[in-house]
Image (cartoon, grey):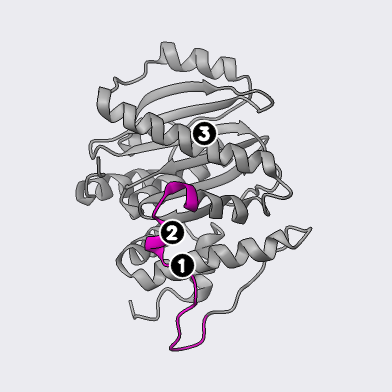
Amino acid sequence: MSEAWPTWETLNAYMDGELSTAEAAKVARAVAERPPLADQIAHLSRLKATIRSSMDSDATVELPPPARGHRWPFLTAGVLAATLAVALVIAAATFLGGGKQSPLALDLLDDASLVHRSWAEQSRATNQAPISSSTFLPALDRFGADAYVPDLISAELTLTEVKLVKQDDYPTILHLGYSDEKDCRVSLFILPVQRGLTDRLMQTGTSLARTYVWRAGTLSYFLLADGMDPERISLIAHGVFDSTRHRLPLTAETRDALTRNLAKATPCPA
């Protein structure tokens, strides 16, 4: 691939979840290997957040690329990755059309990040055992909504946490925690649909803190991971996104891609 790839249009499609699984994985790899691309992704998130927060509609905004030979005056990927909270504030602004119109959803995303980090630390410290169906199915039944939870064993992920998160005046959230042989932790949160989310996969953050959100039917989904190989979490996110939308298992293509990726992925930092 030439240095001109991915183009601005490709990055825009990547941010909007419009690329195929294979194309998205290639872009994720390029972003991880080339810091200027991570800068452009971060800037694109901020620009879209600014524009959408000033609009009442959900119209898609196409943004122009930076001038040739110049870099955008914005925070670098390293600064954005300094804390997971910073990345999630950008995510909430981008995905939810601004906290002004969707304060509840913004708060829920922030709470999800705290739950994920707390569980990930505890999980690594206690070496959690896999969750059995006798624990998972009653929790799913208590959640009450018609949630479709894909089987991620084929993605080499082991379910080690199932919990209903309840807070006053907030909808009940189903938290599913997964681990893999690289000592990585992935959280999938399922909750009633939140205003501002679309049925397209949205992503923000850096390789240190990635967040994906989308809507499928009457439910919203948040997928969080920190420190995971960018290509791997992108493959997982696109696979789970397609699975929840169509209520079908991961495709053979996605399973094969995840198996190949796991063999070369680096371990997650403790």
Query: Depth check: 34 or 219 in front?
Result: 34
Please rate how many residues cluster around mark 2, counting C-alpha atoms within 10 Å: few if below 14, some from 14 to 19, many from 20.
many
Query: Depth check: 260 or 7 in front?
Result: 7
On the image, the x and y values in percent for residue 1 come to 33, 76
Furthest toward the right, the residue is 56
> Which amino acid type corresponds to the residue marked 1 in the rendered image?
Leu
> Which amino acid type corresponds to the residue marked 3 in the rendered image?
Phe
Indicate whether 193 appears above or below 34.
above
Task: Please give the name of the residue rendered at 63% of the width and 72% of the height, measured from the top-left corner.
Answer: 62
Query: Depth check: 175 or 24 in front?
Result: 175
Query: Depth check: 79 or 224 in front?
Result: 79
Label 2 residue SS: helix
Specify whether residue 84 is painted magenta.
yes
Compared across the picture, whether 85 is left or right of 258 comes to right
Q: Disc 2 designates what residue?
A: 80
- For the residues labelled 3 and 2, the Cα–Cα distance comes to 23 Å
Q: How many marks?
A: 3
Q: Disc 3 designates what residue?
A: 189
| Quadrant of image for the C terminus | top left
